Image: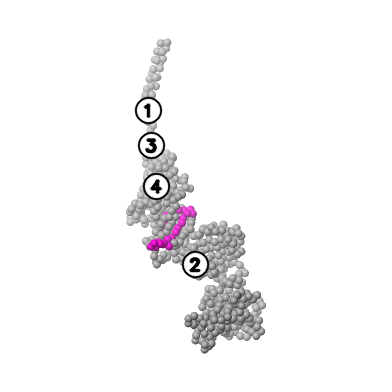
């Protein structure tokens, strides 16, 4: 046994020594990987090129400028922990490189953000917060009023250590070029400001959090001062895009302010450069411009030429969803959540495009199908109806004449598109300053058109009498200087309440109930030697021609339509002895009358026999006055000084064509004239 143990110790001793020797040896350190670098290059001007403000920013960065651009890069490892950060400041747009050194091999996420700060006071609009982790890092703001120089951009990339990468910052907001025009000098504004809705608190920089980049509770108003130092013009950078931008123009005074205008929610896209133009003088009716900066010049040229910038959807037969999509693509519109409501035979929905200007769409069905009519209303009484006429002309419509619908007692200026697919009518509606109604073209509406006919005279004579839409019909009957008939209906004859005496002095509105005392249109130097007198207040008005408000043709038809003067009646009468004219009897659709033709151009008018109303008797029912019934008798707008109970009139018949007079209280027809 001793021999065996001895042999074992001899044989294994060297091996054991080796083992123990190995265990007692100092352990070797694992060699560290070689430190590497990442080279980042970027174009300092790319953000401003994208926003379209490179030239403006260059002026801010000049030697005399007050801004410096900051390009900052943050490096995060695969676990999202911050590894290093670096940056560069510059006042030029040259391409730059930034070398991030001493970074261990591996894959990293690089985040670049770019903005600027003001050198004079060191104020920075943006700062990085919670930067230790990629999941929390964000750019935050203390709520500084933003100008275009505070534009903010960011981008990210995944890179491997030891490589070179080029980063281009992308705008995370947009530029708004604000122009406020016609600031009143006498309004007493100490400051004009725009309050713009902004997300102020921060923007997440983690590329995986793009859907959640906005901090949800950070919406607030930011005051942008536009006046007096900036004279109502300034560019702004705004984070807001999507459907969230809200603008409000405010004029500050001592102790108060004026709300000058508000922009409803407007969709904007990151990287856009839009112009917002607001005209204080036209703010009630002129839609502001909010759209691409490149389209603004053409828009303003149209506006300055007289166009309302009113462009309704005229896709006949379309449904409400199509109209809503069309309206919401406009530069400016007010969201209207009202439901369809019934008006007449149609179902209607209105969209406001300015405070006093709206577009009203009429559909055939309750669920908003088959668009048939569009009416655009202007409720601002300071806007002349000529603006609407100019707009239709610029839109390619031709003025045809006036359309008069007897049932409505309204006259409309009638326009037709050059291709005769659209018609438009302008009318001073009783519940709006004026309105434009658009419809598909209907040929039968020409039956209602009233036009002025060129007979080679000083005025154009209308194609029909006042109150009808056919040239052969007598029309309505009026006392001289009154703008409404005394009856409700002629067939059956129905007098208005209190007017049962018909066309009698007791019903005449400009006298004391007799033909002796007048309360309007009386000259004291008449030749009646006291037979008539002034019965009104104060001194006699000495008027012998109707005021526009007492001219029935002008009140009902509007525009330049009016009753003819005595001289214009005499001018027409004189044509009976002129070889260039032809007068002849004619029966038109069963109605007798006289037709006068200007042989030079072939134009003509038909003057139907109208007769007169005296009291409750029309001359057609009085055998003694039968001859006067077979004549057309039409008021002029003037009266004789020598006999204030008369008004001048035109009388035409086979036996005579003369200028004569008739009692002011009697009911005569009116043939309007226009310039």
Which stretch is magenta?
234-258
What is the spatial separation of the Cα atoms under label 1 and label 3, in whole angstroms?
21 Å
At which x and y percent is residue 352? 51, 61
Sequence order check: which comes first, mark 4 or mark 2?
4
Q: Name the residue at 49% across, 86% down.
A: 525
Quick check: 626 left or right of 642?
right
Mark 2, Cα crowd under 10 Å, few <14 / some 14-19 / many 20+, is some
Residue occupied by mark 2: 380
Specify the label residue 27 is tagged with: 1
Q: Position of residue 148 (x, y in %)?
A: 40, 55
Which badge, 1 or 2, comes first in the chain's sequence?
A: 1
Q: Residues within 10 Å of mark 1 (few under 14, many from 20)?
A: few
| In this view, the mark in front (1 or 4) | 4
Tell me: 139 left or right of 488: left
Would residue 512 be visible to someone looking at this image? yes
Decide: is 641 above or below 154.
below
Q: Nearer the viewer, residue 474 or 496?
A: 496
Any mark on residue 34, and which? 3
Which sits in the foreground, 320 or 585?
320
* Vertical side of 13 occupied by 428: above or below: below
Q: Which of disc 3 and disc 2 is earlier in sequence? A: 3
Neighbours of disc 4 within 10 Å: few (<14), some (14-19), many (20+): some
Q: Could you tell me which secondary element the residue under label 2 belongs to?
A: loop
* SS of the residue under disc 4: strand
Q: Residue at x 61, y 60 (%)?
A: 365
Tag 3 secondary structure: loop
Report the predominant secondary structure element of the magenta stretch. Answer: strand
On the image, the x and y values in percent for residue 78 come to 44, 40
Residue 431 forms part of the magenta stretch: no
Query: Pointers 1 and 4 in contact (CB under 8 A)?
Result: no
């Amino acid at each position: 046994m001793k021999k065996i143990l001895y042999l074992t110790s001899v044989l294994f001793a060297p091996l054991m020594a080796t083992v123990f020797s190995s265990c007692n040896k100092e352990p070797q350190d694992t060699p560290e990987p070689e430190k590497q670098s990442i080279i980042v290059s970027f174009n300092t001007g790319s953000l401003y090129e994208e926003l379209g403000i490179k030239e403006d920013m260059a002026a801010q960065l000049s030697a005399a400028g007050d801004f410096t651009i900051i390009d900052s890069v943050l490096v995060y490892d695969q676990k999202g922990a911050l590894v290093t950060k670096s940056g560069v400041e510059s006042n030029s747009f040259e391409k730059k490189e930034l070398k991030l050194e001493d970074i261990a091999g591996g894959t990293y996420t690089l985040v670049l953000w770019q903005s600027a700060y003001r050198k004079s006071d060191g104020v920075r609009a943006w700062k990085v917060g919670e930067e230790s982790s990629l999941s929390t890092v964000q750019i935050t703001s203390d709520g500084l009023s933003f100008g275009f120089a505070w534009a903010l951009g960011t981008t990210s990339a995944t890179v491997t250590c030891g490589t070179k990468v080029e980063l281009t910052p992308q705008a995370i907001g947009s530029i708004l070029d604000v122009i406020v025009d016609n600031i009143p000098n006498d309004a007493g504004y100490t400051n004009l400001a725009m309050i713009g809705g902004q997300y102020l608190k921060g923007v997440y920089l983690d590329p995986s959090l793009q859907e959640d980049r906005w901090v949800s509770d950070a919406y607030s108003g930011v005051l942008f001062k536009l006046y007096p130092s900036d004279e109502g013009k300034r560019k702004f950078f705004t984070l807001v895009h999507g459907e969230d931008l809200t603008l409000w123009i405010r004029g500050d005074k001592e102790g108060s302010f004026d709300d000058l205008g508000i922009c409803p929610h407007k969709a904007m896209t990151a990287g856009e450069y839009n112009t917002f133009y607001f005209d204080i003088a036209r703010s009630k009716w002129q839609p502001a411009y909010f759209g691409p900066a490149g389209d603004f010049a053409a828009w303003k040229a149209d506006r300055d030429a007289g166009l309302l910038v009113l462009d309704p959807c005229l896709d006949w037969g379309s449904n409400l969803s199509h109209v809503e999509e069309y309206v919401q693509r406009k530069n400016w519109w007010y969201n209207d959540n009202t439901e369809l409501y019934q008006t007449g035979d149609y179902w209607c929905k209105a969209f406001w495009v300015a405070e006093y200007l709206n577009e009203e769409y009429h559909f055939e069905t309750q669920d908003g199908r088959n668009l048939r009519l569009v009416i655009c209303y202007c409720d601002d009484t300071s806007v002349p109806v000529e603006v609407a006429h100019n707009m239709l002309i610029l839109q390619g419509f031709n003025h045809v004449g006036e359309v008069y619908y007897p049932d409505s007692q309204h006259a409309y200026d009638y326009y037709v598109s050059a291709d005769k697919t659209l018609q438009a009518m302008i009318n001073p509606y009783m519940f709006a300053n004026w309105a434009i109604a658009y419809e598909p073209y209907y040929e039968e509406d020409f039956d209602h058109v009233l036009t002025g006919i060129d007979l080679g005279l000083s005025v154009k004579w209308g194609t029909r009498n006042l109150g009808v839409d056919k040239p052969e019909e007598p029309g309505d009957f009026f006392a001289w200087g009154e703008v409404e008939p005394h009856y409700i209906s002629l067939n059956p004859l129905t007098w208005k309440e209190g007017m049962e005496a018909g066309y009698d002095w007791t019903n005449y509105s400009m006298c004391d109930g007799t033909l002796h005392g007048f309360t309007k249109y009386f000259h004291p130097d008449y030749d009646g030697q006291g037979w008539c007198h002034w019965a009104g207040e104060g001194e006699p008005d000495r008027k012998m021609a109707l005021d526009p408000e007492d001219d029935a043709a002008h009140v009902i038809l509007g525009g330049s339509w009016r009753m003819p003067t005595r001289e214009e009646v005499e001018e027409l009468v004189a044509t009976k002895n002129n070889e260039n004219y032809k007068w002849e009897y004619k029966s038109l659709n069963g109605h007798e009358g006289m037709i006068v033709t200007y042989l030079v151009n072939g134009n003509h008018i038909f003057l139907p026999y109208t007769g007169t109303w005296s009291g409750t008797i029309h001359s057609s029912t009085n055998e003694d006055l039968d001859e006067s019934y077979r004549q057309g008798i039409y008021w002029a707008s003037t009266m004789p000084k020598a006999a204030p109970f008369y008004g001048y009139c035109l009388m035409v018949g086979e036996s005579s064509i003369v200028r004569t007079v008739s009692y002011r209280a009697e009911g005569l027809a009116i043939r309007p004239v226009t310039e």
